[in-house]
Amino acid sequence: MKYSSIKYFIHVLVFLICYQSTGQTDKKYPKFSWDKVPIAFHFGKKGSLTNQEAKFITSHSNFIVLEKGHGIPKYKNTEIGIESDAKKLKKLNPNMKVIFYWNAFLDYSMYEAHNVYESHPEWWLKTKNGEYDLKNGRIRRYDLSNPAVRKWWVETAKKEILNGSTDGVFMDAFIQVASKANIKLWGQEKYNAIQQGLKDLIKETRTALGNDKLIVYNGIRSIPNNNTGNNFPDHTDAIMIEHFGIIKSNSKESMLKDIQEMEKAGKTGKIVVFKGWPGYAWIDKDFMAKPLKEKQDISKENITFPLASFLAGAQENSYFIYNWGYRFKHGATDWYPEFDKPLGKPLHDMKVNGWELTRDFEHASIWVDLETKNAKIDWK
């Protein structure tokens, strides 16, 4: 075979591989559109979704994560609760991608799988002093350096997703696993082993689920001296920015870094879920004590800054979430006029001038000042 023929053959082969890969990605990913602000949902509800709630969700998005505790107490565990509403949602919208929440580090008792973990105390993570490592003094953590723990975790995900109606898994708490503060708790050797265990868990999950299911992880978080970007790209499809503009991520430096990390991850083909907040969260007792309507009014008044910040860095397959928590009652399905306005494709990448960000879409222009937390969206 002549050199030119070999070169041509290689080009054709590469094209076919890329074409096949793109086709798989398109099928696996939620159907994306720039027509309006791309919205995702992420919550757990006490009891199951009503038909009206399910119709609203499936007519306003193609992407949802159902959280721990979803469906309880109507159903006896999270697994049944998520599966029941996944069926309901996908019957209404076959294109809906429903993701099963399964924490990668914390043992929550509202899962049937918890009973297996409970019966294996040798799986429970301990500190270097031999004490059980508990979050908030009560929630056990998984020792991801233990292959038996990972096997149980992966088999649980495989059972629920491949034998059920969900389209992938939401692997939470990566940032908690990776925190350097854990070195003091576990010691350097154990810390290193757990970091490797997390990487092994992701790979083992991909092998178990195959390439047609989504692996979503949490996530991107920029805080002083500890910026976490797309640190786990191998075998994952989607990444969440959970704390934009609140808690320890509310400085102008942290917010800019979060937006830039979203832009960077999106350009690699990742789905990016960006959770915006109305300046308050479910952990703020004074805010939560307010009547629902007052919380909703505050959220309406404060939406421009987080939404404009999202749009500044959003790429194809980026999604916006806006509420004040993770339960259905935290404004999970509240809808805003901005979500119904025509948006159109971005005309250029984000422009950064100091702490000011600008960007133009076909039907909107974005201006954000991260220093003053002011923003404007000019809907054309």
Image: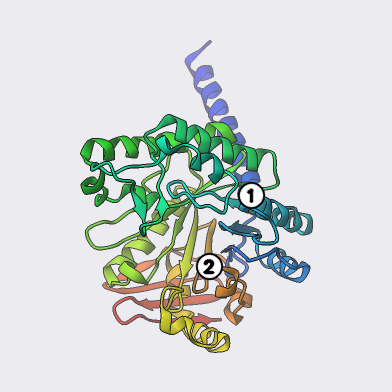
**Lateral position of residue 134 relative to residue 63, left or right:** left
**Looking at the rendered structure, which numbered label has been put on residue 321?**
2
**Residue at horizontal 43%, vertical 62%?**
242
**74 and 277: which is toward the camera:** 74
At label 1, which amino acid type do we have?
Glu
353 shown above or below 204: below
360 shown above or below 67: below
Q: According to the image, what is the colour scheme of the structure?
A: rainbow
Q: Residues within 10 Å of mark 2 (few under 14, many from 20)?
A: many
- Counting the numbered discs, the total is 2
User: Does residue 109 appear in the picture of this structure?
Assistant: yes
Residue 290: give x, y in percent of width and height.
50, 87
Cα separation between marks 1 and 2 = 24 Å
Residue 210: give x, y in percent of width and height.
59, 34
Toward the top, the furthest residue is: 1
**Quadrant hosting residue 58:** bottom right
**Residue at horizontal 58%, vertical 39%?**
156
328 shown above or below 192: below
**373 and 185: which is toward the camera:** 185
User: Does residue 229 appear in the picture of this structure?
Assistant: no
At label 2, which amino acid type do we have?
Ile
**Mark 1 lies on residue:** 79
**43 and 250: which is toward the camera:** 43
**SS label for mark 1:** helix
62 shown above or below 164: below
**191 and 238: which is toward the camera:** 191
**Residue at horizontal 42%, vertical 33%?**
200
Residue 1: give x, y in percent of width and height.
53, 10
